[in-house]
Image (cartoon, rainbow, N blue to C red):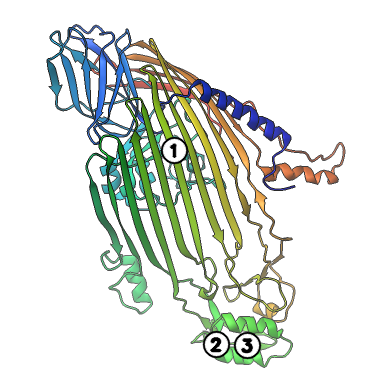
Amino acid sequence: MTGTALSGAVRRDFARSFLAALAALVVFSFSGTAQVSSGTLVGTIFDATGSAIPNAKVEAKSVDTGVVSATVATSDGDYRIGGLIAGTYSITATATGFSGQTLQNVTVEANRIATENLTLAVGQVATNIEVTEAVANIDTTTATIQNSFDTQMVRDLPISSIGLGVVNLALLGAGVASNGGIGAGEGPSVGGQRPRNNNFMIDGVDANDKSVTGSLIRQYPNDAIAEFSILQNQEGAEYGHSSGGQFNAILKSGTNAFHGTVYEYLENRNLNAVDQQVSNANIANGVGAGFNPRFDNNRFGGSVGGPILKNKLFFFSLYEYNPVGEPATPSGVFAPTAAGYSLLSSTPGLNQTNLGILKQYLAPASTAVAADAITVGGQTIPVGPVGINAPFYQNNQSFVQTVDYDISDKDQVRGRYIYNRLSQIDINATLPVFFTSNIDTYHVASLAEYHDFTPGLVNEFRLGYHRLNQPTTAGNFKYPGLDSFPNIVLNDLGVQLGPDPEAPQTEIQNMAQMQDNVTWVKGRHTIQFGMDLRRYIAPSTFTQRARGDYEYNSTQLFLQDGTPDYLAQRSLGNPVYYGDQIQSFEYVQDTFKFRPNLTFTAGVRYELTTVPQGERSQILNSIANVPGVLTFGVPQDQKTNFAPRLGVAYSPGSKGTTSIRAGFGMAYDVI
């Protein structure tokens, strides 16, 4: 059995999903918008009496690129323009027998529907009334609860420069709390859910680490983010995968003018005030009070963006380097003094191999402390504390590349790529001599095509890919007579001999993704449906105690080569576990505009996540079956995961400045 093999049932499930997706692509070979990573403008065109104006022409022009997206309002005066890159737009509405109206500086956010109603006065078409500043727009047509943060907020707010970076911005919203004491996982707790239930995307592409959950990309360059958004639990049927927050980072695009930046964010021990607790600890250790321990975080980089073909083809590129240096000073480590090692060398009955390992890797203490002495072979061995000043650094490199091509007023193509490389020292061993260097690499890429088939029928198609390679090495250390250097712990000395206790382990994750989302406006109904297929190839190795774990309460027992009196375990080998699986998500949703200010949403989502390949190997245990008592078989996929979504949005009056929302939904978390 190979790790990438699929059972017949899995192949059939995938074949059905793939054929359904292929059929959707054949029928809807045009493209346009959904709410995966683009913004949408909706609204109603009124006359001065408040009556709807049918068949008005509406255009949204990007301030940055000059690209114009147009549509025609329905017979009820409603319009919808989707597939918009996050940014600032001017909206113009015209109709026969009426003066035109233009709203300037309309903000469009990704993953969000903004409502902008326009009122036209009776007059000549050639006359245009321009409103230089649009009021802050909000989504008044869906029950979705969302917060978005633009480029300036991502770049300038201090909370986005520490820890998880832009993900921290979610804490500024209502219903979002820190993960302290709530549960395992990465990011905040959204709507009372565990952080492990969060879903991370980059321009709509899956960016989840499927092993222990959390974001695949370890560092988002703040200066590469055009917008960061979080959708809370009350989202539409097009969102799923998890019951917590839906986090989506939108990368910057180029504009019609060339722009470049050079930046540096510096946090340095010499610039930070000395904490009083640190000062007290320094005084207690006799090293003075006026300095901080090492902490140097220097994040710098540059970007450039602009047109390749004006009004048509744009690019944006960014490179960032972020070295971080900190101290790694394990405390509570003790060792025999030089005199103590001399006594041990002359003590009979000791295993010379074990004694040689101790002397080789644990340097003698300079000063003995009587209370710390140990007894070996009837000898009192002088012992003292060992000061360890270990190196620790993390060097993060990030590269971002985006390309946007507006083929015509009906077709757009967008390419996205983000790369992370993390080079760091593994300091999980106690002694610096056992520290190892590891390099982790992360990739996320996507190619999306948007097309307006008609003003009321649009589609978005996307191909996505991500890859994670995260090794944890055990180095090349040798222990005479053994095939690998074990993990040895001497409790009376407070020391661990050997590399990282959890090494070696590896995690590799490859994900190929295909999405298609269709939006069809028919009268007062906006019908959305689509699919999302994902194929994972994810081999990993993580077997506890693969090198052997031997823990002694007394150093004497170790030196006499006795059986460990605290723990003695070793796993048989370090096999590869294959987390290969398929995910298939489909949804359909109808947004019914009952009145211009009252909207109902009803939808359903279906999710199929197959059992990982490694779990299917459970059938190999069938040799141990005991009929009627214990039977091993292949775990079955859950095939009834339907998730209904209901919502209502009400906006009092006709200005679209207030929205009252309510909703209900079900979700299934990916294990």
Mark positioned earlier in the residue sequence (1 or 2): 2
Between disc 2 and disc 3, the foreground one is 2
Measured in 3D between alpha carbons, the distance from the residue under mark 2 to the one under mark 3, in whole angstroms, is 12 Å
- Which residue lies under the disc numbered 3? 380
Q: Are marks 2 and 3 in contact (CB under 8 Å)?
A: no
Q: What's the amino acid at mark 3?
A: Thr
Kindly identify the residue that appears in the image at 49 percent across and 20 percent down.
603
Residue extending farthest front: 309
Looking at the picture, does residue 171 appear above or below residue 520?
below
- Which residue lies under the disc numbered 1? 447
Q: What's the amino acid at mark 1?
A: Leu
Return the mark for residue 337.
2
Kindly identify the residue that appears in the image at 25 percent across and 37 percent down.
310
Mark positioned earlier in the residue sequence (3 or 1): 3
Q: Are marks 3 and 1 in contact (CB under 8 Å)?
A: no
Between disc 1 and disc 2, the foreground one is 1
Looking at the picture, does residue 430 appear above or below residue 415?
below
Between disc 3 and disc 1, the foreground one is 1
How packed mark 3 is, by other alpha carbons closer than 10 Å (few <14, some 14-19, many 20 or more), is some
Return the mark for residue 284.
none
- Front residue (pair 257, 646): 257
Kindly identify the residue that appears in the image at 34 percent across and 78 percent down.
287
Residue 81 placement, left or right of 333: left
Measured in 3D between alpha carbons, the distance from the residue under mark 3 to the one under mark 1, in whole angstroms, is 70 Å
Residue 159 placement, left or right of 481: left
Q: What's the amino acid at mark 2?
A: Thr
